[in-house]
Amino acid sequence: MRKFLLGILLILLVVLLLYKSPFSGMYYYNAAKKMYDAGQYEQSIPVFEKSLFSDPKNLLARFNYVLALSKSKPTLSVQKKLYDMGNSKYEDEAKKYARFQAVSLRHNLLKGLEGNYIHNALMGNDILRWDLNTFPLKFYIENPDTVPPYYIKEVKNALNQWTDRTNFVKFQEVSDPDSANILIRFKNIPSDICSGNVCPYVVAYTEPVVSGNKILQKMELNFYKTNPKMQNFSAREIYNTALHEIGHTLGIMGHSDNPSDIMYSSSDGASLYAFYTSSLQYLSLNDLRTLALLYRLQPTISNTKNISSESLYYAPLILGSEDARLRKKLEEYSAYIRKYPNFAAGYINISSVYVDMGDFDSALAALDTAFPLAKTTDEQYLIYYNKAIIYYNNQDKSTAFNFALKAKAIKDDENINELLSDIKKL
Ligand SMILES: [Zn+2]
């Protein structure tokens, strides 16, 4: 019995030695290098990884591993491995070379997509888009009879332009609102939207409905039936606004800084009357490139769970670090606030960036500035909701609860009830 046990121990020891030691590291390295020299780059990768598992700091193995990665087909996992090597904890030539290779791979992947504004298209740190496999996207028009027929015609023309220009976006009208991805409705303009003689000129706005587990349930596209003077919008206003808002429903959650793009921010809230009525707008090449790139990234919020394919782009490689992204967002919203200091939206958006950065004081200050500027109940709801989130993060249960109740009094939806139950669990 004792001999038997000894035998097992000996085998275990040998296995352990082979498994994780410079000796086995060298064995796998030689095998991997042989494959690499024969031009079998993809096949050599898992063997290099075995070698590095045994001997993680081996420079020769690390360097040749990076070489093999950079000569392989740039699948999602190859992109990720190269990115990880470039951010490795070992400061050596292999890391430097991986960084260099990652930059040039990024450059190659983005060929033809130059000029995109993808950093502005994200929702905070989230990449939100539909699952391409569920196209055509289903849309439902809730109350078409409450507006002049040309409103509906122009909305459908705008949907068609997105289809014609992208070659991959497809829409289908459905008669059942529950099966719709995009819900289009026409609302009465709030009576208190003007302060004094100043009326923000809003034609429409879009809101994503996202459930707690990061599933995109719906996009709600809300048009106002009239302007604040109770006049109908012109056909061009409806068409141009629809083009812009459809961009949001497809997942472009921010705005371009360039006035020649349809997703330029002036189309929200502060548009000049002349801008809308004078000319027909078109999707720019940069709008199309941004959407194309968005649909090559692996989403973090979508209508399907765990979308993954080796043909996708690895987001950190394309977008840079989370830090860089947040700084870019902060710049975008600061510019918006400078342009439209009397609009609540800019302050609400910037507060969410502060939250992502962990700067809760600045987030609360931005929301306090937003509150007296809020013109719609949706904005007021967002302010209360975001305040509740901040106090929740600060572990201040009773203040969080109070703000959540105020939000719930405005709009009793799934998000607020979920937050309330999370606060109760504190
Ligand atoms: Zn917009």
Image (cartoon, rainbow, N blue to C red):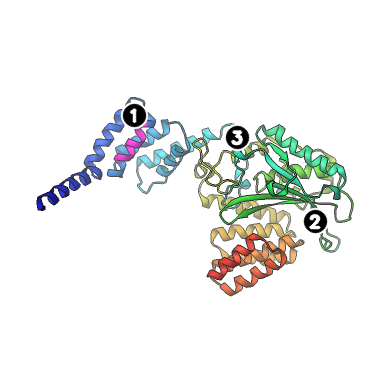
The disc, 3 or 2, on the residue closer to the chain's N-terminal end is 3
Furthest residue in direction top, as rendered: 38
Calculate the distance from the C-alpha at mark 1 to the C-alpha at mark 3.
32 Å
Q: Is 47 above or below relative to 377?
A: above
Residue type, numbered disc 1: Tyr
> Foreground residue, 107 or 33?
33
Tell me the SS state at disc 2. Answer: loop
Left or right: residue 117 versus residue 377 is left
Tell me the SS state at disc 3. Answer: loop
Other-residue count near label 2 (Cα within 10 Å), few / some / many at <14 / 14–19 / ≥20: some
Whether disc 2's CB lies below 8 Å from ligand 1 is answered no
Q: Is 397 above or below relative to 96?
A: below
Q: Position of residue 53 (x, y in %)?
A: 31, 44
Left or right: residue 379 versus residue 200 is left
Disc number for residue 113: 3
Residue drawn at x 74%, y 39% as measured from the top left: 159
Residue type, numbered disc 2: Pro
Q: Position of residue 214 (x, y in %)?
A: 57, 52
What residue is disc 1 on? 36
Calculate the distance from the C-alpha at mark 2 to the C-alpha at mark 1.
63 Å
- State which quadrant residue 264 falls in: top right
Q: Are marks 2 and 1 in contact (CB under 8 Å)?
A: no
Disc number for residue 200: 2
The segment highlighted magenta reads 43-51
Left or right: residue 22 versus residue 70 is left
Calculate the distance from the C-alpha at mark 3 to the C-alpha at mark 2.
34 Å
Magenta stretch holds residue 16:
no
The disc, 1 or 3, on the residue closer to the chain's N-terminal end is 1
Residue drawn at x 76%, y 39% as measured from the top left: 158
Tell me the SS state at disc 1. Answer: helix
